[in-house]
Image (spheres, helix red, strand yellow):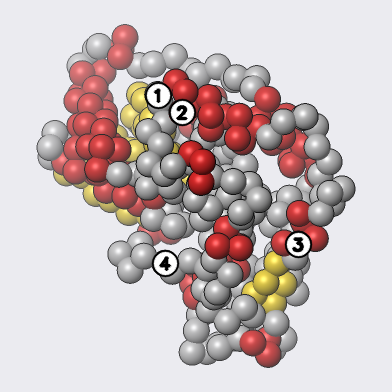
Amino acid sequence: MKSIVIYYSQTGNTRKIARAIHRGMSQVAEQCDIATVKEVNPKDLDKYDLIGLGSPIWMGGETPNVRIFIDKIPKQQGTHIFSFNTHGVMPEQYFPSMVRRLKAKGFTVIGTRDWFGSVHFQMAPKPYFTDGHPDEIDLKEAEDFGREMAENSRRISAGETHLIPPVPEHMYTPQLFVLLEFFQSGHNPHGHISYNKEKCLYPKCTLCMDNCLMGYIDLSVDPPIYGSRGNGCDMWMGCTFCELICPTGAISGNWEEGMKEGEGPGPVLDFNPLEKAADEVIASGRLRLLVPREQIRFDNPYIKVYSKRPRFKIPKDK
């Protein structure tokens, strides 16, 4: 069996899970590769018997670069694939859409699995509900899952097609209405991100260019190209990573404006759906809370706790 784990990871959560899955698959498969979506040509996937595809969840779905990667995959002839992700407590809409998208490409989807991951986001409370994940328990589960997927792939190929799971049904949760509102607004719900050339360290620093998953930044030209609009970023999927990692504040966001009542998409619910979702998974035992619940407060956002630049340092082995 020739297999591969393909993933995108921004802050390191999905990378950790992908590597653990790879360890598990390697215990069964004769060959198991691992690579990021940037390192793989989607036209070369037909040489694999089993593929694992992982992404963080952004606004209920996969990241834009993972979606583009899938769009470029040629029609398959039943190649086995499984999907995995990391998230911050709102995964319900991911697999129903992802599995259908992969099946439309001709894949046989043999499994899905999600894990909680630490959140690094300007408007989120800090500490956050899922901070500390994925931990060693999560990574052991991921390794077991990888081994299971490789074993199931062999058994399905041998005729045990009952191991192929049904397509997940869409779940109409309160969180769905919030996601729909963000999508309909057509812009980044967290505000515009802007660039100040005077504060920039380029060419000494190229962090934003190197880590923009959409390739929206080119500071080597005059005038510099920054973001989805060329002179600013309004990426509707909600990415604000360049602001997090900028060491000088040359990239900044209008967070205060975004937090004002009445700014951006209006409220559709009379409760905080993120907090409700988190408390539900905690109560069910699905989320092992690794931080004190009383310390998680929405009036204590990430930008307040990490006011100094950079707000986030990229892991060296990312």
Is disc 2 in contact with disc 1, using a CB cutoff of under 8 Å?
A: yes
The Cα–Cα distance between marks 2 and 1, rounded to whole angstroms, is: 5 Å
Give the mark, 4 or 1, whose residue is nearer the N terminus. Answer: 1
State the quadrant of the C terminus.
bottom left
Q: Residues within 10 Å of mark 1 (few under 14, many from 20)?
A: few
The Cα–Cα distance between marks 2 and 3, rounded to whole angstroms, is: 30 Å
Residue located at (39% from left, 16% from top): 165
Give the mark, 3 or 1, whose residue is nearer the N terminus. Answer: 3
Give the mark, 2 or 4, whose residue is nearer the N terminus. Answer: 2
User: Residue 224: image x %, image y %?
Assistant: 68, 83
User: Residue 74: image x %, image y %?
Assistant: 47, 41
State the quadrant of the N terminus.
top left
Which residue does the numbered mark 1 point to in the structure image?
285
SS at mark 1 in the image: loop
User: Residue 39: image x %, image y %?
Assistant: 38, 59
Which residue does the numbered mark 3 point to in the structure image?
256
